[in-house]
Amino acid sequence: MLKNFGVTRLQRVVFYDYDEIGFLTDYNFRKIPEPKNEYEEFSAEPYYHVGPDDIFPEEFQRFLFPNNHTKRIFNELHSDLYDIDFWKKTQEKIKNGEFIDVFPYNENLRFTNQFF
């Protein structure tokens, strides 16, 4: 949810929903199952079981973006984050001891390439 994100004075996005932080490897990334009938399809409540550690990446778009402009840009740059395989592969990398670096800037904009 947008209320859990902010922008620092250096224009970096930060996440600060401290009550729901956990290890990425502890979560169960799932795809929403197809509805079996119209009743399930139009139900106001989930027609499938949702466990306490279940995450449905395909729902991210609905909760993260207040407007279509932001959604469009995010989709162009990071649509892989809606894919369950991305998250499961990331979990496997972590479990295998791989350290994953995520850089907020393109390589040509990074400090070491600007000043050294």
Image: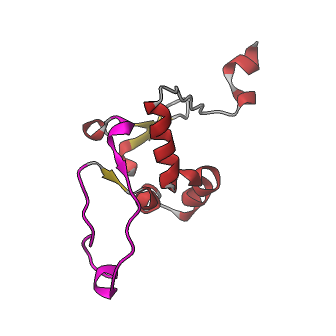
Q: Give the prevailing secondary structure in the magenta stretch.
A: loop
Query: Which residue lies most toward the front here?
Result: 96
The residue drawn where x is 43% and y is 63% is: 62
Where is 16 relative to 48, above or below? above
- Residue 107, image x, y percentages: 72, 29
Q: 11 left or right of 66?
A: right
- Identify the magenta region: 23-52
Locate the C terminus by quadrant.
Answer: top right
Between residues 1 and 56, which one lies in front from this camera angle? 56
- Residue 16, image x, y percentages: 35, 36
Query: Which residue lies most toward the bottom here?
Result: 38
Q: 84 left or right of 114?
A: left
Q: 75 left or right of 5?
A: right
The coloring applied to the image is: secondary structure
Q: Is residue 13 magenta?
A: no
The residue drawn where x is 34% and y is 34% is: 23
The residue drawn where x is 26% and y is 59% is: 50
- Residue 18, image x, y percentages: 29, 35
Where is 20 relative to 57, above or below? above
- Residue 94, image x, y percentages: 46, 32
Where is 26 relative to 31, above or below? above
Quarter residue 105 falls in: top right
Query: Which residue lies most toward the top here?
Result: 116
The residue drawn where x is 29% and y is 80% is: 40
